Image (spheres, grey):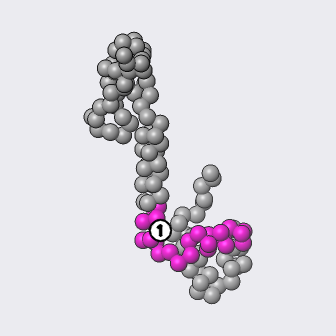
């Protein structure tokens, strides 16, 4: 997605000018933006203070990080994440293969053998 040439603080300043009574068309002309962009910004940032905006950005970054961790946990550890050799272990040693779950700190998981037990 393309980045805006305006910072969030500049966007809020433009929106406050409009709230103060300046004509929207004049604000758009001086800022070189379209009316559609202005109203999209108004819908997204209406009533926000700069402190609230920075808090919202921090929450978005944290949510992005947590989604990545959750995706790694759902996907599970792959063969490349297993400690030891890169080659898969033979079937008789599969239950002793030691793997580390993504996002965990030193916790270990053990694979169960895929063979049917007698």
Q: Tell me the SS state at disc 1.
A: helix
Residue 31 visible, this orientation = no
Measuring 42% from the left and 65% from the top, which residue is drawn there? 55
On the image, the x and y values in percent for residue 108 come to 30, 31
Position above or below: 110 against 105:
above
Q: Residue furthest front?
A: 118
Q: Residue furthest left?
A: 106
Position above or below: 29 against 20:
above
Position above or below: 12 against 116:
below
Q: Residues within 10 Å of mark 1 (few under 14, many from 20)?
A: some
Which secondary structure class fits the magenta region best?
Answer: helix
Q: Quadrant of the C terminus?
A: top left
Measuring 39% from the left and 12% from the top, which residue is drawn there? 90
Left or right: 28 as drawn, with respect to 63: right
Stretch in magenta: 34-57
Q: Quadrant of residue 51?
A: bottom left
Measuring 41% from the left and 18% from the top, which residue is drawn there? 116
In the rendered image, which residue does mark 1 sit on?
A: 53
Comparing 114 with 25, the one in front is: 114
On the image, the x and y values in percent for residue 48 come to 50, 75
Residue 47 colored magenta? yes
């Amino acid at each position: 997605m393309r980045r805006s040439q305006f910072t969030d603080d500049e966007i809020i300043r433009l929106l406050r000018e409009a709230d103060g009574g300046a004509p929207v068309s004049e604000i758009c002309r001086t800022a070189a933006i379209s009316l559609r962009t202005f109203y999209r910004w108004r819908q997204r940032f209406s009533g926000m203070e700069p402190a609230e905006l920075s808090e919202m950005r921090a929450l978005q970054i944290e949510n992005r990080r947590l989604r990545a961790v959750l995706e790694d946990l759902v996907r599970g550890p792959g063969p490349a994440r297993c400690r030891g050799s890169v080659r898969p272990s033979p079937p008789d040693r599969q239950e002793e293969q030691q793997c580390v779950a993504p996002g965990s700190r030193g916790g270990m998981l053990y694979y169960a053998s895929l063979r049917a037990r007698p």
